[in-house]
């Protein structure tokens, strides 16, 4: 499988602060890859380096087969980038924005005509071509921004938080659009805070404090962490049990879901330890079930292992 992206020990410092800390990863051509992480994890900085928009302090990057430092213009020809901050001109109409970006990417008249129709179609903007971009709801603007970022049919598309602030229906529509680009052969790199969006990605790279804490397919990652000591305890007294378990030093996390208490029990024989606590506290009827970790459980576990929650 050919590689769309290869990064080796990529580092970005701002003064003495390390925003991206020697990360290495590979992205195969044609994949949909999600960078997941909390505020300040280093997602945008990584993407900007890959796009040649900011120089790394050290490390190597190949994008679309080109060394980014040596051939930034070649890289630029092959990528589309939708920035986290609004990338359209709000005082231009839909039509004017598309025409503007067509000019930026040097499309011929006939190419622009063809792509104009495509963007209007996929962004669901037919009949709205002459509206001011600032008058469009956020979801439409985001799709227009994506359309403008891929007018030149780039092989690799970087989308930085494209779904932030939109409702789930709009978000799903946006992901359909991503799926469509992927079906046409593009490699998609998308950043998000939302772990549920990780399920739409073929591979996910979880970042925390400038480092990669997990990298793999959603199923592969779940398999890798399937033995996390997570348990669901069914009881008639969930609140009481929760209060009891919270006091145990080997329980690092507990949460109530209906009649269940979910716990993360870090001890040698967690099921026995749990049973002992329940009996000691005269909780008679209970059922302990080993739970499969969700991607969120895994992310929490891995970020905790790195220390701290977020830098922002
Ligand atoms: N130009 C800059 N100068 C100084 N620090 C910066 C600069 N750009 C980013 N940072 C810092 O680097 C860290 C990583 O920022 P980055 O924007 O890459 O994170 P992110 O994962 O994209 O976060 P978010 O989810 O909030 O978009 C943050 O602590 C940020 O404050
Ligand atoms: Mg960001």
Image (spheres, grey):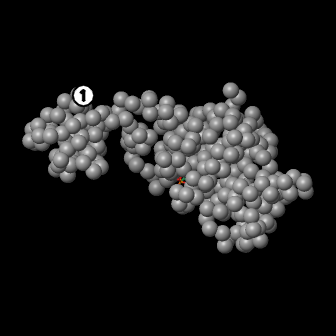
Q: Nearer the viewer, residue 259 or 203?
A: 259
Q: Is residue 142 in view from this perspective?
A: yes
**For residue 29, which quarter of the picture?**
top right
Residue that mark 1 sits on: 268
- Residue at 18 percent of width and 39 percent of height: 286
Say few, some or many: other residues with alpha carbon within 10 Å of mark 1 (under 14 / 14 to 19 / 20 or more).
few
Q: Position of residue 52 (x, y in %)?
A: 71, 46
Q: What kind of element bears circle 1?
A: loop
Would residue 292 appear left or right of 255 to someone viewing this image? right
- Residue at 70 percent of width and 45 percent of height: 181
- Residue at 74 percent of width and 64 percent of height: 126
**For residue 261, which quarter of the picture?**
top left
Above or below, 152 relative to 136: above
Q: Position of residue 39 (x, y in %)?
A: 49, 53
Q: Position of residue 148 (x, y in %)?
A: 74, 56
Would residue 227 appear left or right of 192 to someone viewing this image? left
Q: Position of residue 246 (x, y in %)?
A: 21, 46
- Cβ of disc 1 within 8 Å of ligand 1? no
Count of marks overlaid on the render: 1
């Amino acid at each position: 499988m050919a590689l769309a992206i290869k990064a080796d020990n990529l580092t970005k410092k701002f003064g003495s602060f390390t925003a991206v800390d020697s990360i290495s990863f590979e992205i195969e051509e044609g994949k949909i890859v999600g960078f997941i992480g909390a505020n300040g994890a280093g997602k945008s900085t990584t993407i900007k380096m890959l796009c040649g928009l900011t120089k790394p302090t050290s490390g190597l990057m190949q994008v679309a087969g080109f060394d980014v430092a040596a051939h930034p213009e070649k890289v630029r020809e092959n990528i589309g980038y939708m920035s986290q901050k609004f990338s359209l001109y709000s005082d231009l109409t839909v039509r004017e924005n598309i025409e503007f970006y067509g000019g930026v990417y040097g499309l011929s008249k006939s190419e622009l005509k063809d792509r104009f129709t495509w963007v209007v179609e996929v962004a669901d903007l037919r009949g709205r071509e002459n509206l001011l971009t600032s008058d469009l709801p956020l979801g439409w603007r985001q799709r227009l921004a994506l359309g403008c970022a891929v007018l030149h049919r780039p092989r690799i598309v970087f989308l930085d938080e494209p779904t932030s602030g939109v409702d789930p229906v709009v978000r799903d529509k946006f992901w359909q659009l991503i799926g469509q680009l992927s079906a046409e052969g593009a490699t998609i790199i998308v950043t998000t805070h939302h772990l549920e969006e990780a399920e739409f990605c073929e591979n996910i790279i979880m970042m925390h404090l400038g480092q990669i804490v997990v990298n793999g397919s959603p199923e592969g990652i779940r398999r890798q962490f399937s033995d996390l000591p997570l348990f669901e305890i069914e009881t008639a007294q969930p609140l009481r049990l929760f209060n009891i378990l919270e006091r145990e030093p080997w329980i690092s996390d507990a949460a109530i879901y209906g009649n269940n208490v979910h716990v993360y029990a870090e001890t040698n024989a967690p099921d026995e330890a749990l049973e002992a606590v329940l009996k000691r506290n005269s909780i008679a009827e209970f059922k302990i079930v080993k739970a499969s970790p969700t991607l969120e459980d895994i992310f929490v576990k891995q970020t905790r292992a790195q220390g701290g929650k977020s830098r922002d």
